Amino acid sequence: MLQILSQQLGRHPDINDWKINLICNDESQWYYNGPRLESKRKIADEYAIVTLYHDENQSGELQRGEARFTLFRDQLSELNSYVEQALNMTRHTFGPFYSLPGPQSPAAVITEDKSFTAADTHFAEKALDILNQAAIAHQVTLAAAEIFISVARSTLMTSKGFNESYPFTNVYIEYTIIARERDFKAEFFGFVDERSTTLEDLAAQVEQSVRYARDSLHATLPRTGQFAVVFSNNSLPTFFRSFIYHSSAQAHYDGLSHFKPMADVLPGQARGDTLTLASDGLIPLRKGTVPFDSDGVPASRHTLIEDGILKCYWTPFRYADILQIPCTGHLFNVDVQPGHTPYDNLIQAASREPLYLIAALSSFEPDRYRGHFSAEIKLGYEISNGKTIPIKGGSVSGNLFTAFEEVYFSQETMMYKSYRGPRAIRFENVTFSGK
């Protein structure tokens, strides 16, 4: 497939450059209705993500347009149609000319767990055992579960002579736990989506999900007002989204970034921990770990923000070429420096006012440009006067840039998808709407 695509693209007179990312994926899927295996599927996919570049002189300046399409192997007979549609789209996306990088040596990184195979029935069975045993031990119901194990290979070929590939694995598990008490019931949805996981890590997560489901049965609304709050678990990576956006060369080029090199990233004076954030493509078995990015730039580590100061923009090759600044590659994993406060100290209320610990949000999508956020509380805890009371419902809202002026990071760390950083972060003044 790769040879057919590269030959046809290379011969087309209107295509000035091209990239082909070929994905070959071998995956097994198990679907469970409660503890019972409902179905099993095996999928073998081969598809290409094709990017075309077309150049034209406009008003005396060379301009470049870009368009992308995805093509599966059984669609090869339609390649010409896809190419012509994409070329037509490039004519609506002209911008300053930029080139593609030439061949470079990929970084040496770990992207696959060799203990997994796509037909790893043993792991799937053990994972289901963990779910069932937790349900029985805590008298809750395992409503449904899905387990996917993928073994894949990604190959990147470009018109500039780059041609490299790497293997990667992925484990995806999702499940629904239902807790009941008299006429009340509460459910909690859990999932794993990683390059690798262990049965021990899965067991710990399932135990946590069971506890959350049972606590939800007794949860009440939070109070209304402004309180200290600790966020933990899988919502954490999203809190850094605005900082990542404003530290991008694209936002800088578009005139949208609030950040200036070697200047504070916060509008006011920091009174707690300062933020140090890096793009790191070298952490073993993380979702953002690759030997090279989608342009063929080798993975690396670059500190973007250090002690609250912007050190550099993360800069894909396109914007490095346009702006004539160093290329860091696309964003890899987000690596946030932890703090010095133990987690147990972080969740202690500092006054008579309660402190809220947020375990899960229903949905969390902060405004990456302005930093505003508002989210419904799926489950949390009110900690006050030595008591811990489950809460849910209501909302928590604020502004990330303002909140980070007094933030404290736990010294304990966690890893989740393409995030490595503090296990918990504490803000001192966030707005709650509840009872």
Image (cartoon, rainbow, N blue to C red):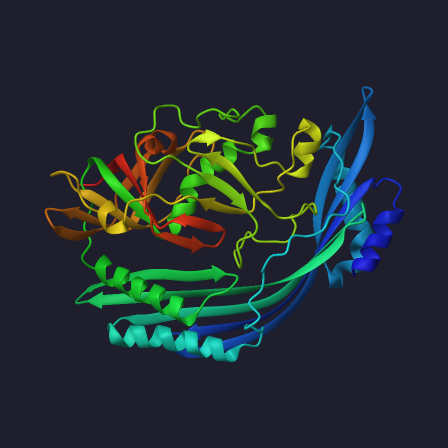
Residue name at image x 30 percent, y 73 percent: 135
Q: Is residue 210 left or right of residue 329?
A: left
Q: Position of residue 351 (x, y in %)?
A: 13, 38
Question: Of residues 421 and 371, which is closer to you in this image?
Answer: 421
Q: Would residue 365 be visible to someone looking at this image?
A: no
Q: Position of residue 93 (x, y in %)?
A: 71, 33
The quarter in which the N terminus is drawn is bottom right
In the figure, residue 199 lies in which quadrant? Answer: bottom left
In the figure, residue 219 lies in which quadrant? Answer: bottom left
Q: Is residue 421 left or right of residue 30?
A: left
Residue name at image x 66 percent, y 33 percent: 319
Q: Position of residue 404 (x, y in %)?
A: 35, 33
**Location of residue 248 with respect to 29 vertically, above or below:** above
Q: Would residue 259 be visible to someone looking at this image?
A: yes
Q: Position of residue 70 (x, y in %)?
A: 69, 52
Residue name at image x 40 percent, y 36 percent: 275
